[in-house]
Image: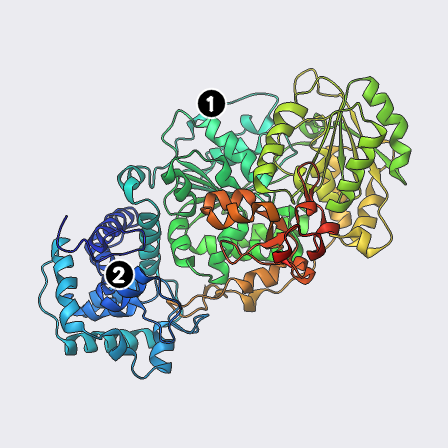
C-alpha cells in the first residue's frame, strides 16, 4: 500500500500510479523497437492519464456517473502538467501523445475533442482545472513515485500549458502521428493485461524464425524448388492451389509478418497451420478476427495481444489494415506496427471492385511505410495484376514468379460438366454414394444452402451431412469448421457437405465431387480447388468431376454476384472437358477484360502520396462500413440474452451471429451491451441450419417483455 492507492485509473480498482508505470514500461519498449526517443516515450506515458487525479474524474469513476451535460476529459487535465518539460520541442511531442489518445482533437463524433470543447465551451479550462491547487499536489506526488523529479505547478502554469496545447493542435498540418500511435499502442496493451505485462513484453517484436519453410523442398510443390532470396523488395506469385504459395510467400519474408486473407475461415485455417509449423520457435502468431479469439488459449495475454502491436505474425483481413487508409480511430498505432514489416496479401482477387480499390490504396500506404509487399494469387485478371505491378514499382522492384505450362499441366485435375439444373446431377450423386465418395455442394446464398441441406436430408436420410455458412453463432461456426476438416474431410464413407462461399479459400479439404451454382470465374476456380486437392505422385493425372449449374436470369437470384459476370463465366467454361490450368489466365481475362474503376480517393486519409487528414484527428468507422457495404450487424438468440449481458468480450463473441444489416428493419429488440446485437427469437436459430430469417420477427419471441 502507498498513500496514492486510493486514486484509481479504472473502475476495476487499478491504482493510477500502477497504470502509469505499466504504460510507461510498454511505451519504452515500443520506442526501443521503433527507433523513437525512449525518455520522451516514458515521460509522455507517465503524463497521459495524470489528469485522472482530479476529484471530478475520481467521483465519476467510483459512482458510475451517468453522462454529465459537461464532460470531463482527463486527457485535457493531463495537459496541465506540460511545464514539467522544459523544452518546447519535447512538450510538442508529449502533446501529440496525450491530446487525442481517446478523442479526435477536432470533429469528434461526440464533440468531445480538445478543439471541439475549447470552441464550444468558453469555460473549458476552468471546469477541468477545478480544485487544481489541491489535486495537483497528489498528481505531482504520483509522478515522483514513478521516478520523475517534479516541481510545483501553479494554476497559471496550468493555463499556459493548456493554451499552448490548444494553439499547437490548431496549427497542425495533415499527418499520421507516430507519437500518438506509440501512446495508444502502449495504453491499450498495458490496460488489457496488467498482471501479465512482463511476460507479454518479452513476446513483443520477436522476428519469426521461418527457416522451417526453407527446409521443405518437394517436387510435388514446384514453388518450393524456386529460390526466394531475390533482392527485390516485393513479390507477385501466380500459381494454382496446392503449388506451395504459402510457403513461398513466407520464405520471402525477413521481418515481422502481417498475413492477410479474405475470410474468417481462411484466417482460422492459416492460424492453425502457422501455429503447428512454428511450434518449436519463439514466434508469436495471432489471428486478428473476432471469431478467432475462440481459437486462442485461456491465457488472458494471448486473448489481448492479437489486437495490439508487436506480434511476430498477425493473420487478418485487409479490412483491419484499412483503418490506416481511412484514418479510423487507432490508425496511427496500426501504421506504427506495420512500418517496415513484411505484408502478405493472399487471394486478393476474391474481393469486390470496391474492396479491390481499397486493397490498392492499402498497398500504396504500405509502400510509404517501408513495407515489403508479397502478393499470392491463383486467379488474378491481367488488368489487376498490371495495376499491382505498376503500383509496387514495376519489374525492378518486384520479383515475379509464375510456373511453366509444362508444370501447370500436372495441376490439371478437374473435368467440368455444365448442367441446367441440379436435378440433372442425381444419377452422378447416386453413383458417387455407391463409390463411398465425399460430395461438396456449394450455393451462393445462405437461404438456398439451407433449403438444399433440408432437401438432401429428406432424399438421403442415411448419408451423414452437414451445413456450413457465415450465419452461425461464432462458437458453432468454429465447431463446424473443425468437424468439416477432422471428420468429413477424413471420411472413408459417402458424405455430403453443403456450403456457401466460405469454402472458397484456404480451407484445407479435399472432396471427390462438386455440385456448384455458377459464380464468377475466379471464385469458381477457387471452389474447384476443394476437389481432388490432395497432390501425390500417384494422383497427378487423376481427374474428378465438377458440375456447374447454369446462372439464374433474375438479378435477385444471382446475388451477391453480377448477372452479366455470371453469364460470361459460364460461357467460357468448356462442357464435359478438362479444365486446363494453362488456360486459366485466358479464361480470367475473357471474363474480366477490364475491372470497373471505383474511385474511393475522397473517402481516404492518404491521397496522392501524402496524408490528407489533420494530425491527431480520426474519422468515424461508419465511413468505411458504408463504403464497403459491410454486413456488420450481429444478433443473439433470446435464450442467450442474460448470458450475453453478464458476459465478457470473449463469451459474448461466442454467442454472436453475423447477419445482414437489413435486420434493423425487422422491429427486433436491441441489447444495449457489447456489440449492441439484435435479439432474435430462439425459433430463428437452429444449431444445424444457423440463422433462420423467416422466424426473425417479434411475434416469435417467447417472452412477452421482448415485444
- Mark 2 — residue? 49
Please indicate whether residue 387 sits to the left or right of residue 584 in the image.
Answer: left
Mark toward the viewer: 2 or 1: 2
| SS at mark 2 in the image | loop
N-term mark: 2 or 1: 2
The label shown at residue 629 is none
Determine the CA span between mark 2 and mark 1. 49 Å
Regarding residue 592, the answer to whether it shows in the image is no
Q: Quadrant of residue 530?
A: top right
* Between 569 and 440, the one nearer to me in the picture: 440
In the image, residue 238 lies at what x, y percent? 62, 39
Q: Which residue is disc 1 drawn over?
A: 215
Residue 660 is left or right of residue 140, and the answer is right
Q: Is residue 512 above or below residue 679?
A: above
- Graded by Cα atoms within 10 Å as few (under 14), some (14 to 19) or many (20 or more), the crowding at tag 1 reads few
Numbered disc 1: secondary structure: loop
Residue shown at 42% from the left, 41% from the top: 303
120 to 615, vertically: above or below: below
User: Disc 2 vs disc 1: Cβ atoms closer than 8 Å?
Assistant: no
Amino acid at each position: 500500500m502507498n498513500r496514492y492507492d486510493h486514486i484509481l485509473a479504472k473502475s476495476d480498482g487499478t491504482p493510477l500510479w500502477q497504470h502509469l508505470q505499466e504504460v510507461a514500461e510498454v511505451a519504452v519498449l515500443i520506442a526501443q523497437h521503433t527507433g523513437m526517443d525512449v525518455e520522451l516515450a516514458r515521460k509522455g506515458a507517465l503524463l497521459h492519464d495524470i489528469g485522472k487525479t482530479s476529484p471530478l474524474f475520481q467521483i465519476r469513476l467510483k459512482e458510475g456517473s451517468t453522462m454529465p451535460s459537461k464532460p470531463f476529459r482527463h486527457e485535457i487535465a493531463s495537459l496541465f502538467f506540460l511545464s514539467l518539460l522544459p523544452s518546447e520541442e519535447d512538450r510538442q511531442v508529449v502533446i501529440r501523445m496525450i491530446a487525442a489518445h481517446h478523442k479526435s482533437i477536432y470533429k469528434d463524433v461526440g464533440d468531445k475533442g480538445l478543439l471541439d470543447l475549447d470552441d464550444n465551451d468558453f469555460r473549458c479550462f476552468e471546469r477541468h482545472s477545478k480544485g487544481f491547487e489541491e489535486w495537483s499536489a497528489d498528481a505531482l506526488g504520483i509522478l515522483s513515485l514513478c521516478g520523475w523529479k517534479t516541481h510545483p505547478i501553479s494554476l497559471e502554469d496550468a493555463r499556459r500549458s493548456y493554451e499552448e496545447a490548444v494553439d499547437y493542435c490548431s496549427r497542425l498540418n495533415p499527418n499520421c502521428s507516430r507519437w500518438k500511435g506509440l501512446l495508444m499502442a502502449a495504453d491499450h496493451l498495458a490496460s488489457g493485461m496488467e498482471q501479465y505485462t512482463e511476460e507479454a513484453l518479452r513476446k513483443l517484436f520477436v522476428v519469426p524464425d521461418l527457416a522451417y519453410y526453407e527446409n521443405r523442398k518437394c517436387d510435388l510443390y514446384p514453388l518450393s524448388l524456386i529460390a526466394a532470396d531475390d533482392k527485390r523488395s516485393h513479390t507477385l506469385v501466380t500459381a494454382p492451389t496446392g503449388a506451395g504459395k504459402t510457403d513461398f510467400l513466407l520464405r520471402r519474408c525477413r521481418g515481422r509478418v502481417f498475413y492477410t486473407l479474405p475470410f474468417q475461415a481462411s484466417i482460422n485455417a492459416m492460424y492453425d497451420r502457422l501455429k503447428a509449423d512454428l511450434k518449436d520457435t519463439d514466434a508469436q502468431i495471432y489471428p486478428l478476427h473476432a471469431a478467432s479469439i475462440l481459437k486462442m488459449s485461456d491465457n488472458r495475454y494471448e486473448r489481448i495481444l492479437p489486437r495490439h502491436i508487436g506480434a511476430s505474425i498477425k493473420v487478418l483481413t485487409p479490412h483491419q489494415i484499412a483503418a490506416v487508409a481511412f484514418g479510423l480511430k487507432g490508425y496511427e498505432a496500426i501504421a506504427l506496427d506495420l512500418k517496415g514489416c513484411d505484408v502478405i496479401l493472399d487471394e486478393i482477387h476474391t474481393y469486390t471492385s470496391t474492396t479491390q480499390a481499397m486493397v490498392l490504396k492499402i498497398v500504396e500506404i504500405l509502400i510509404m511505410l517501408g513495407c515489403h509487399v508479397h502478393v499470392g494469387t491463383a486467379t488474378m485478371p491481367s488488368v489487376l495484376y498490371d495495376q499491382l505491378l505498376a503500383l509496387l514499382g514495376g519489374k525492378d522492384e518486384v520479383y515475379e514468379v509464375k510456373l511453366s505450362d509444362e508444370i501447370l499441366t500436372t495441376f490439371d485435375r478437374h473435368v467440368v460438366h455444365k448442367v441446367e439444373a441440379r436435378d440433372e446431377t442425381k444419377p452422378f450423386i447416386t453413383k458417387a454414394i455407391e463409390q463411398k465418395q465425399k460430395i461438396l455442394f456449394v450455393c451462393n446464398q445462405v437461404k438456398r444452402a439451407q433449403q438444399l441441406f433440408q432437401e438432401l436430408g429428406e432424399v438421403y436420410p442415411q448419408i451423414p451431412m452437414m451445413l456450413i455458412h457465415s450465419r452461425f453463432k461464432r462458437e458453432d461456426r468454429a465447431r463446424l469448421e473443425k468437424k468439416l476438416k477432422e471428420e468429413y474431410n477424413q471420411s472413408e464413407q459417402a458424405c455430403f457437405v453443403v456450403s456457401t462461399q466460405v469454402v472458397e479459400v484456404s480451407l484445407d479439404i479435399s472432396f471427390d465431387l462438386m455440385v456448384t451454382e455458377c459464380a464468377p470465374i475466379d471464385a469458381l476456380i477457387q471452389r474447384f480447388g476443394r476437389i481432388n486437392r490432395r497432390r501425390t505422385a500417384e494422383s497427378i493425372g487423376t481427374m474428378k468431376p465438377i458440375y456447374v449449374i447454369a446462372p439464374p436470369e433474375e438479378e435477385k437470384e444471382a446475388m451477391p454476384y453480377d448477372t452479366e459476370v455470371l453469364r460470361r463465366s459460364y460461357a467460357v467454361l468448356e462442357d464435359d472437358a478438362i479444365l486446363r490450368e494453362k488456360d486459366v489466365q485466358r479464361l480470367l481475362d475473357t471474363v474480366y477484360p477490364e475491372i470497373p474503376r471505383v474511385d474511393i480517393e475522397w473517402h481516404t486519409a492518404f491521397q496522392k502520396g501524402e496524408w490528407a487528414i489533420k494530425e491527431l484527428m480520426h474519422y468515424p468507422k461508419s465511413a468505411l462500413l458504408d463504403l464497403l457495404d459491410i454486413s456488420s450487424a450481429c444478433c443473439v438468440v433470446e435464450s442467450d440474452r442474460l448470458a450475453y449481458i453478464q458476459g465478457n468480450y470473449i463469451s459474448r463473441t461466442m454467442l454472436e451471429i453475423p447477419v445482414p444489416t437489413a435486420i434493423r428493419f425487422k422491429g427486433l429488440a436491441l441489447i444495449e451491451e457489447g456489440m449492441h446485437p439484435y435479439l432474435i427469437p430462439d425459433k430463428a436459430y437452429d444449431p444445424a441450419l444457423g440463422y433462420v430469417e423467416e422466424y426473425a420477427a417479434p411475434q416469435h419471441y417467447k417472452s412477452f417483455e421482448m415485444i
